[in-house]
Image (cartoon, rainbow, N blue to C red):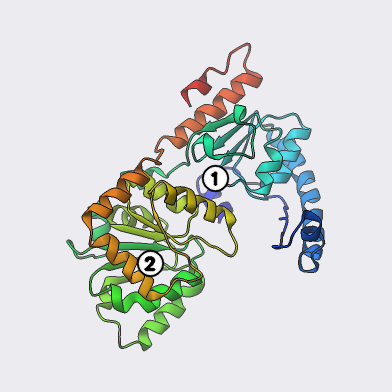
Amino acid sequence: MEARIVTASGWQFAAIKAGKFRRMQSAGMLSKLLNPSTLGPNIRDLARVVQGVGGALRILRRFKPEVVFLKGGFVCLPVGIAARLLHIPYVIHESDVSPGLANRILGKWAYRIAVGFPVKHYHDFDKSRLMYVGNPVRPDILKAHRLEGLAMFKLQDGLPVILITGGSQGATQINDVVLEALSGLLPHYQIIHQTGDRDLERIRFELGRRSDITHLERYHPYAFLMKEMAPALAVADLVIGRAGVGTINDSAALGKPTVLIPNYEMASHQLENARLLARQGAVRVLNGTTLTPAKLVGEVKRILDDPAEQALLSKGIRELGRPQAAHDLAVLLEATVRKFHGAGESAAGEDEA
């Protein structure tokens, strides 16, 4: 997906090999390292990291960047190591409140670490190098109007709209609960649902077999929302999704009441994100492992039938929104270039960020 989006935007794209470190829920680092189910894949992926460092060294020598920007994730580790070896300054952006392993390693040598939440919530980094910039939001998300969503999805004005997303690849766990909850939701609400590629046809097939679900014209399933996401968010009265920063940031930028269903089994950073926002009263959180259609319907009705609850959630999540995050990151990167390559210029531009 990255290659397609980047090249379509006119940017040069270069790929490297990378590998992830798999950790099972066993006690102690040694036990995690030697776990039979992860030992083989970890050895294989360690070789990929070494290959990735070699590839990154070749790419960086060819591109000759003045600064390297690392967004996080295991693919950044070999690039950061290569930048360190070539004495190229790099800036990290950590979106989540709980940093991943790659960023915790690379954070030791980063010039600056931009973070998606207030600095006080981070304990794995040297706070003197942290900068709170928030997480970037696409400009079209900020510009879309509710009327665009009504027209694009052929929605009925005056009937509440729910946007449900399990991320770009969808979430079968959420999709299954939503499918069973439709009979309780569609008589009262309209739904735009990003299902992911793998579940869309299955959901359509199941809907064709169900006679208990009425008002199916109010249900709008999509495998993936690209240009449709901005109008979908603009028209939504409630957002339901995983606790990834994409969902959180978009909702925060627009002040949308939000219910988070973090991935309790795979993504600990989602749990931390959800817990932080829940403590601040910015979202409502449901446990996906115990979620039932009845619980989902009950939570939706509790929010959408209570204007005061909607206003409270909207205010709480909007306070976390940083619509200028992309600009502040750009200022930080430019200041880093001046710091290391400017002829005696100071990095005063950092103060703007």
Quarter occupied by residue 213: bottom left
Instruction: Give the class, few, some or many, for how many residues have Cα within 10 Å of label 1's Cα (few <14, many ≥20).
Output: many
Residue 289 in picture, x, y percent from top left = 51, 70
Residue on which the image places disc 1:
97
Q: How many marks?
A: 2
Task: Please tell me which residue lies in front, 143 or 212.
Answer: 212
Residue on which the image places disc 2:
193
Task: Please tell me which residue lies in front, 338 or 266.
Answer: 266
Q: Is residue 316 above or below residue 87?
A: below
- The mark lying in front, picked from 2 and 1, is 1
Quarter occupied by residue 147: bottom left
Mark nearer the N terminus (2 vs 1): 1
Quarter the N terminus occupies: bottom right
Residue 61 in picture, x, y percent from top left = 74, 35
Q: Residue at x 42, y 74 (%)?
A: 292
Q: Is residue 291 left or right of residue 350?
A: left
Q: Is disc 2 placed on a helix, strand or loop?
A: strand
From this viewpoint, is residue 144 visible?
no
Residue 276 in picture, x, y percent from top left = 48, 48
Q: Is residue 213 above or below residue 108?
A: below
Q: Which mark is residue 258?
A: none
Amino acid on which the number 2 mark rests in the picture: His
Task: Please tell me which residue lies in front, 37 or 44.
Answer: 37
Q: Residue furthest top?
A: 344
